[in-house]
Image (cartoon, rainbow, N blue to C red):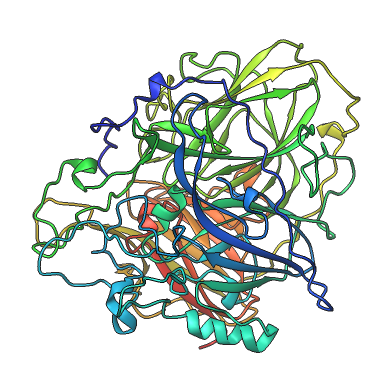
Amino acid sequence: MAPAVQVTADGVLDPETIEKYVAELVIPPVMPRDRRDSGTGLDSYTVGVRQFRQQVLPPGRPATTVWGYGSTRHPETFSYPAFTMEAEVGRTTRVKWVNQLLDARGHYLPHLLPVDSTLHWANPPGGVAWRDSSPTFTSTPGPYEGPVPIVTHLHGGRNAEESDGYAEAWYLPDARDLPAGYARTGSFYEVFGRKSAELFGAKWRPGDAVFHYDNRGRASTLWFHDHALGITRLNVYAGLAGFYLLRGGPADVGEGVLPAPAPKRGDRTGMTYYEIPVVIQDRSFNTDGSLFYPASRAFFDGFTGPYAPESDMAPIWNPEFFANAMVTNGRTWPVLSVEPRRYRFRFLNGCNARFLILKIVTAPSAPRPATPALPFWQIGSDGGFLPTPVQREQLLTAPAERADVIVDFTSVPAGTELYLINEGPDTAFRGGVAGTDFPPANAKTTGQVMKFVVKPLTAPDRSTPVSQLVLPPCEPLGAASRTRRLCLNEVNSASVRGAGPRAVLLGVLDSSGKPMPLGWGDPITEDPALGATEVWEIHNLTKDGHPIHIHEVQFQVVDRQREGQTPRPPEPWERGFKDTVVAYPNAITRVKVRFDQPGRYMWHCHMLEHEDNEMMRPFRVGLS
């Protein structure tokens, strides 16, 4: 794809003028539960989505209007990112997700960001007959300004289809002024709602959906975010994301004590924590503090039309967007006070499209590539603990990947200042080494993430040195019964010479090896039998790396192979269970997957701009 355009539009805040390291890192508190349902034994939540203002930029600068999740019974909990949801392996969690994107009068709120209604998207204005489709227009439309659809996906969970957060199971807020003829819900909302009512007696009502998470599997770092069809990039960018930490079970820590405590329900303010979830995202701001996101395709590559319906080019969609400021746990360039002891950080790359390469260094603007001051000891990935800790000088993480790490500050003198920096590119990631194969992120802005200030030790460190930790084993999945050959594709305009990419698509290879790109609406081609173990062989035919996510499974990476070369085994930090894998350009990535949950799910690229324009496909387990 074309290089990213620098964010220099009129009215956009220059990130070099934003003060750094003046606000404390926010450590997300734990989401409060509803009172336990009588007789069910379930951990129940009622979680809404609302619009509010939050101090994302440093104090003294304008607040930012964002969207966030929170407990409807505890209005003070609405936050970007969300308060953390804690769950226990084997204990079911029930969440009523409520779309509360309403004003004080109960009228719907339009989107904060420009919605391209020419894509294949939820399309509420199409009514029931034309929802979840690509609408037709007689002239190029401006941004959609109607009520906003949402549906929440628990990323990394292993749940039944009605609780997956399927892209076509979206729903609008229960607004007083919904326009006549609009579809209130997506194509699968009613199907899954009936199933939920039959199984759990949990009736879905206008503006909400009730999901049940049975919390199977291993202790792991999961997260939840919006997944509405064709609008995910905007809903997540507006703030809809949060951690979901699954604890306990036989695959929790083997032998040893991990850094603790972590936040828990009922904590008083000012508590000290040694286990901290950290979500890193890139955002751009207007000078009034509002979020900036491109309102024209021209922002990406200068293409000024003709747009749909005069051509097949969408007028607003950008193939990728790389914002110019780094936001960590909802604040730009925060600072965290640490003690000379071990800390556990659960890192999540929550960016729309940006790959991160994280290092801890002594100077924030040191020449890139910089020399690390401390290593990361990675103990877990997407699907829980690794077989053994892995020492890493830097953390490469793709959008949606998690890295559970220990950083040992024990030998660092009090008064020392250290910095978490990013050496990933300010454009699409294609693999390689920063400074050799691509320019690293801007050392003054997107190349910096947060600051650590070492304070004196306040209490003994009871955690186990990493060299003495014994992590729980990762059982291999066993032999596969089938190998599927899949592909990643870009397509240019069919009506405007040289314009593109028009869309990005998944697909399959036919018997001769020819790629067959497929869109969201094409017939299902991935239909594994219930209980089957398969190898998915992903051929990346594009020039960019893509983080590929398969819903409701945790897979194992088998190998990667470039043309004419022998297969290369997974990286040491990929040798546990994962739900998102980097598919490098012009290479084959193989993952082994066991499908033990029947139903209809999705697999897609987790670069959200890609996902929203056809790089997502449904798959079906055990229903053929």
Q: Is residue 235 above or below residue 379?
A: below
Q: Residue at x 40, y 34 (%)?
A: 289
Residue 116 placement (x, y as % from top left): 27, 58
| Residue depicted at 72% across the width and 71% down the height | 214
Residue in front for this viewpoint, 621 or 457: 457
Q: Is residue 203 above or below residue 554?
A: below
| Identity of the residue drawn at 28% across and 44% down | 294
Apparent side of residue 492 relative to residue 352 in the rendered image (left or right): left
- Considering every residue shown, the one lying at the far front of the view is 105
Quarter where residue 420 is shown: top right
Residue 619 in picture, x, y percent from top left: 48, 75
For the N terminus, give its image quadrant.
Answer: top left
As drawn, is 381 to the left or to the right of 356?
right
Q: Is residue 489 visible?
A: yes
The answer to whether residue 552 is visible is no
Quarter of the view holding residue 614:
bottom left
What is the tally of numbered marks visible in this picture? 0
* Residue at horizontal 82 percent and vertical 52 percent from the top: 472
Using residue 570 as the reference point, say whether residue 285 is left or right of it: left
| Between 230 and 270, the one nearer to me in the picture | 270
